[in-house]
Every structure is written in C-alpha cells, then in structure tokens.
Image: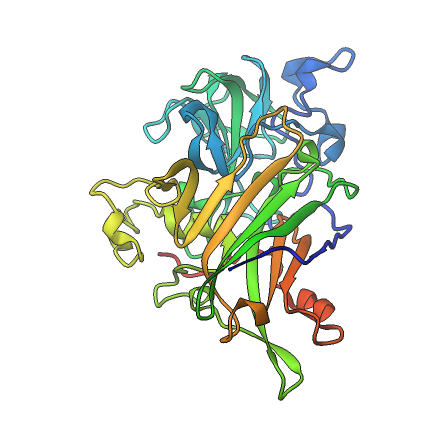
Amino acid sequence: MKYVITLLVVLTSTAGVFAGGYDDSVNWPLCGRISESPPVNWQVTAGCPVDRQGSAAYSDYPLSSTFGPRQKASAGYHYDYHRGIDIPTAINTPVFAVSAGRVVIAGEHSAYSDPLVQIEHRRPGASSCRAGGGCYYSNYMHLASWVVASGAQVNKGDLIAYTGVSASGFSHLHFEVRDANPADLYSRWQRDAVHPLRVLPYSRNQSNPMTVAFSEVQSLGGNAMQVSLRIEQAAAAERLDLAKVSVRAYRWLASAGEYQEVTQPGNSPDDSGFYAHPTFLDFEQNNFDFSHKDSASYPWASFANCPYAEDHPAAYTANIHLDAQDPADTSVGHFNGQYIAPDQFNAYSSVYGLTLSFASVLGDDQGPSLTCLVAEASDVSGQQVFAEWGDCGRETGFEAAALAEAPSAAVRNKGKKVR
C-alpha cells in the first residue's frame, strides 16, 4: 500500500550567518573571485581587501559540489560523501587565508593525493587550542603552487597559494573546515570535517527557500513503513547549506485527546554512542561517527565497537562506510538503513536535489493510515522547513506545537564522547 503527500509546511527565519566558535569575519578563499575582476590598482600580494572580509557580497559562488552526499562526476557519477566544497576556477587563481593562523601543512603530504595548505585557527579570544576547547583548521587543496611554509604565521586575507587541478583533471579549489572535538583537542582527521558554510559568509535568498516533501510512504507490514523524502534548494547558487534531514512519527491517543510521538529505536545511541538505523541524517554527525580515524590515541583497531566493524578492512580507510553504494544503482548511497540519492549537480545547475529514504520508520500499531509523519530539513544555521503526511489533523494546534518542538541543527554536539 502506498500513500502520497498531503501537506507541505515551510518555515523560514532571518537568522544570519552561523558563527559558533569561529572567526565571524572571514573572507572566502578566493576573496570573492577577486582575480576575475580586480579592483583598480589592486595587487595580488596585497591579499584580500578588508572590505571583503566577513561580507556575503564577496562569495566564491557558484560551487560545483557541497558538503555531504553527491554523485562524483570524475568517478562515473558514483555515489560519494564529500567533506568540503568545490569552487571551480581557472588554474593559478590566487588563494587567500580565510582567517589568521599557523600553517600546519604546505605542499605535498602523505595523507593527501594533491598539494595543499592547511592552517590552524584558534577560537576567538583563545590563547591556545587547549584554552579554546580545540582549534579548527582550514584546508585548501589541489594546489598548483604555494607561497607559505609549514610553521609560518599568516594573517586573514594573506596570499597563500594558487589553484591547480585534481587527479580528475578538473581545475578547482577544494576547501574544507575541520573542527577539533574538546575531548580530542588537536584532531584534524576527515571525521572532524564540518560544513564550510558554518564559517564562510553567505546569503540565503528567502524567495527561494529550501523545501522538503514526502515522495512516498510504503507499508512494510504491521507498524513499519519505508519513508522517502525529497529535499530541494532552488537558489542553489546562493545556498547549498543543507545539514540535516529527519522524520518523526506520531500516533493519536483517543483516551488522552492528543498525539504521542512513536519511539524510533535507532534514534537512541548504543553504549558506544553510535546511531544504528536512525530516522535522521545529520551530515556532520554521520561523518564524525562513521569516518573514524587512525591516530596514536585512537587507532583503527579501537573502532571495533562500530556497529559495522565487520566491514572494516585491515588498513584504515575513512570512506568504507559513507561511500557505500546501492549494488543495484551505484549513484545511490546505501548505509545504516538509509538510501541516499543525490541529483547530479555542477556549477551550472539551478536546483540542488536529494531523495532520502529511511528503510524503516515505526508508526501507529494499526498501520500507516493512522500515523502522522513530520519531516524536517535544516540548514547549517538551524533554519528549518517541514512537511506533514498522514493522520495529522485530529488535534487543534498540533502542527504548530510539533514543529516548535523539532530539534534544531544549529549547534553541533562538540562535547560528545570521542571514539
């Protein structure tokens, strides 16, 4: 039995650029693509002008890839989990430090396939990484050349490098932000990557908000359903900031005259802090939980408590879980009870789209027809959009109350136990 969408609810906010523990006046790494139309008398060695720092008017859009699920063009459009943003640009475009800090890597490094610059940044007002509860790091990758050395101190906007091409032959800058956990102060592994739009200034066009809708709800028998959602951002050239998607289920309690949320077993962590088959997909949380690491303090073998440890090869790889594909369609991700189908996307696309299916959502004991489902999609600042499906009209004011109770994606849980 299949059901279709009944209602779409969209909420927007006027929240500004997210800035939590980061420099709130950074510049984009290409300084608003300044070299494409340089100001009069500007010299590249002068760096990114102060008036472009902290300004959404000087962004490096359009992007060809964003943080999270994608189809990787250079790999035959196979599913891939991306931990940064890609900024297409000509070879030898100047690159600038987004904030002041210490250069940790400059050039070739055994952990990376192409040359990069990595800069360590302290929290605002912090005298050290320890005092700030961990530092954060900016990565500038696929470089043709670099003009800084490891150990050097750089100021915000300083020229640090020139762009190159990736192994695929695509000329672009891959930019990342890696954010150390308070319990692991100097960590800068792939699992520490967060959405760069948490740090970079950008505008959200409210006339073209993000939308979420139910595309299919299929009964699996009893109170179990497979639920599919469609998420889109029409203003892709100004957004690409999707951070979290979730579904919650409610049953009607006639005796109490109110709705009761149905507990989803996968939404509670196991004893090691992992979520198995949750009815939410938090891009950053998923990356932190399942990319793992292989450091002296947290070696690869220490992640044997992962629910999918049987899939771990002998040698560490960050991608064993998050790059897992559906054998029937390699453009679709299939991991942890979720099917993730991102649309093909590039810098010329007008819409960013993603179809997400949760393999099992529990509803009313009498089946889907008596279940109310609420879907939520959040951006990096916590701005949320919602959709309803099913038996949701029995309680006056329920919709508003349910939406108000929805958890926000605005704050990343940086205090979680490190594994």
Question: Of residues 345 and 89, which is closer to you in this image?
Answer: 345
Number of numbered labels in the structure image? 0
Quarter of the image where the C terminus is located: bottom left
Q: Residue 305: which quarter of the image?
A: bottom left
At x 54%, y 45%, the residue is 355
Residue lying at the far bottom of the rendered structure: 255
Q: Name which residue lies at 69% across and 25% down.
A: 32
Vertical relation: 32 (above or below) 202: above
Residue 327 appears at what percent x and percent y? 34, 40
Determine which quarter of the picture holds residue 274.
bottom left
163 to the left or right of 110: right
User: Quick check: 82 left or right of 97?
Assistant: left
Instruction: Give percent across and percent down for residue 98.
Output: 61, 32
> With respect to residue 375, does 89 lie above or below?
above
Q: Residue furthest left?
A: 314
Instruction: Name which residue lies at 63% across and 24% down.
Output: 348
Compared to 123, does 372 lie above or below?
A: below
What colour scheme has been applied to the protein in the rendered image? rainbow
Of residues 309 and 351, the one nearer the viewer is 351
Q: Is 106 placed left or right of 369 in the picture?
A: left
Residue 17: image location, x then y, percent: 70, 45
Q: Is residue 410 visible?
A: no
Q: Position of residue 4 (x, y in %)?
A: 61, 55
Which residue, as the protein is rendered here, is positioned at the far top? 41
Residue beneath the point at 70% across and 71% down? 393
301 versus 137 height, above or below: below
Q: Quadrant of residue 302?
A: bottom left
Does the image show residue 240?
yes
